[in-house]
Amino acid sequence: MTVRELLQAVAHVWPQEGRPTLPAAGALDVPCTAVTHDSRRVTPGSIFVALQGLKVDAVRFAPQAIAAGAAAIVAEQPPAVALAEAGVPWMVVSDSRTALALLAAEFYGHPSRQMQVVGITGTNGKTTTSYLTAAMFEAAGIQCGVMGTVMYRIGDRVIDATRTTPEAPEVQSLLWEMVTSGCGACVMEVSSHALALRRVDGMRFAAGVFTNLTRDHLDFHANMEDYFGAKRRLFEMLPDDAPAVINADDPRAQALIDVSRQPVTYGINKPADVTPGPLSFSLGGLHFEIRSPHGIVHVRSPLVGRPNVYNILAAVTTTLALGLPTDAIERALEKLTGVPGRFEIVSSAGDDVTVLVDYAHTDDALRNLLETARPMAQRKLITVFGAGGDRDRTKRPLMGMVAARLSDVVVITSDNPRSEDPARIIEDVNRGASQETRQSGAEVMTIVDRREAIERAIARAETGDVVLIAGKGHEKYQEVGGWTVPFDDVKVAREALEARRVRS
């Protein structure tokens, strides 16, 4: 496809009155080699789309793109005189992000139309639900790609994730690789950022899934309505025949049902299309039946806790709606033993304490986590956690309150402080924890260094205690003062456990 043909294919993105007139024969009649928003990735024949960023307008990088051989520039403003004289066609659009998404989808041949793509959105539970859903496709004999917070998986190849949902060209490239490697399905986590910033525009989703909505990302979204509005976009995008799988127990469920053409609900507390039978909770796993319009599904899962009942319900409801056989779903449930950094037990049977690592980084997720972990503690529950810098500050004291209410010992430490002073973040968290200790009697301490905090918590634990390390989960780094440094909660915890064994 030439640059001209690609631009013409998405011409409808521009309003009729502002639609650019493409130059006559010449500059655009060359093969298009790439669609990119990164001037550093421009090659001769590329279309460079200058995004209007939160901090920087990428049009400032147009000269570098032109110097690297860009065949066309797409931006939300006309070129400066010097750039106009460079002779490279310049297309002005009303929304460069929409243009980028549609151009990328066209460039890669719309791979989402060539397989079943399940989009999962919500505050908590996306990753575990995606792993469960992918396992069900695989058990049914359908090779399934994965795109989410932990990793991107294409066949047997696994790539560490850079963000939950990457920019549109990366999304389309990954989907194209999945198709060419034989995937018949893809399960992807769709973040509110991705929906608000149009990263998945131009895609065809075979199903959309809503897990829940709780306070998060208010550093990016203006308020909870804006946050929910971003999530709702996924369901507004669904084709008429695509099931919209919705958690009926969430207060926002009805608003999503109202905009969905094929709503299918699941829930525990409220009437729903798919519901569980009597629930059996134990530290050995979950055992219950799921009742659905497609029949009964027998759940035998090593996963534990009430939050995973919801994750299982979401995955089962989705795959049943897409026609997967019940026996494959049941096999997948029994086989999936866990998800990296999600209630991951890092201690061994020989240890006298239990140590868990989890990604929980909101007050609601932390509450669910602590309520699940509490029955495992023969004595005390010790919680180590922090809050991220340059992110939603309103949740910090709420997380402190939850931790102090449901733990015996709380160790507040650094998470990813980014450009903020870690001590100031800890102070915000501790403000909520201190209020709660008046009622709970929990012991609260603050240790800025995360390694020291983990080591101290494990060293002071007594036989039968549970040490819960929350916030970073699968991450293998810390973002501190503009630097990304290696840090792995699982590795640090295992080293501390080994030191404990040596001392004993």
Image (spheres, grey):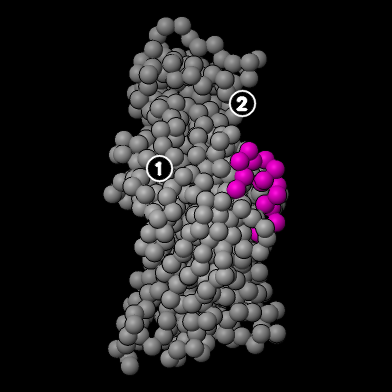
Can residue 498 be seen by looking at this rendering?
yes
- Mark 2 is surrounded, within 10 Å at the Cα level, by few (under 14), some (14 to 19) or many (20 or more) other residues, namely some
- Element class at badge 1: strand
| Residue located 43% across and 16% down the image | 5
| Residue located 34% across and 80% down the image | 348
- Examine the rendered structure and indicate whether residue 403 appears above or below residue 160: below
Q: Nearer the viewer, residue 336 or 155?
A: 336
Residue extent of the magenta highlight? 249-264
CA separation in Å, label 2 and label 1: 33 Å
Would you name the residue on which mark 2 appears?
Answer: 94
x, y percent for residue 296: 50, 58
Q: Nearer the viewer, residue 475 or 478?
A: 475
Q: Quadrant of residue 230?
A: top right
- Determine which of the numbered discs, if any, sits on residue 266 in the image: none
- Determine which of the numbered discs, if any, sits on residue 185 in the image: 1
- Examine the rendered structure and indicate whether residue 221 appears above or below residue 105: below
Q: Nearer the viewer, residue 386 or 62?
A: 386
- Element class at badge 2: loop
What amino acid is found at the position of numbered circle 1 in the picture?
Ala
Residue 250 lies within the magenta run: yes
What amino acid is found at the position of numbered circle 2 in the picture?
Ser
x, y percent for residue 319: 47, 49
Q: Quadrant of residue 243?
A: top right
x, y percent for residue 173: 38, 36
- Examine the rendered structure and indicate whether residue 141 appears above or below residue 267: above
x, y percent for residue 76: 58, 27
Quadrant placement of the C terminus? bottom left
Q: Nearer the viewer, residue 79 or 297?
A: 297
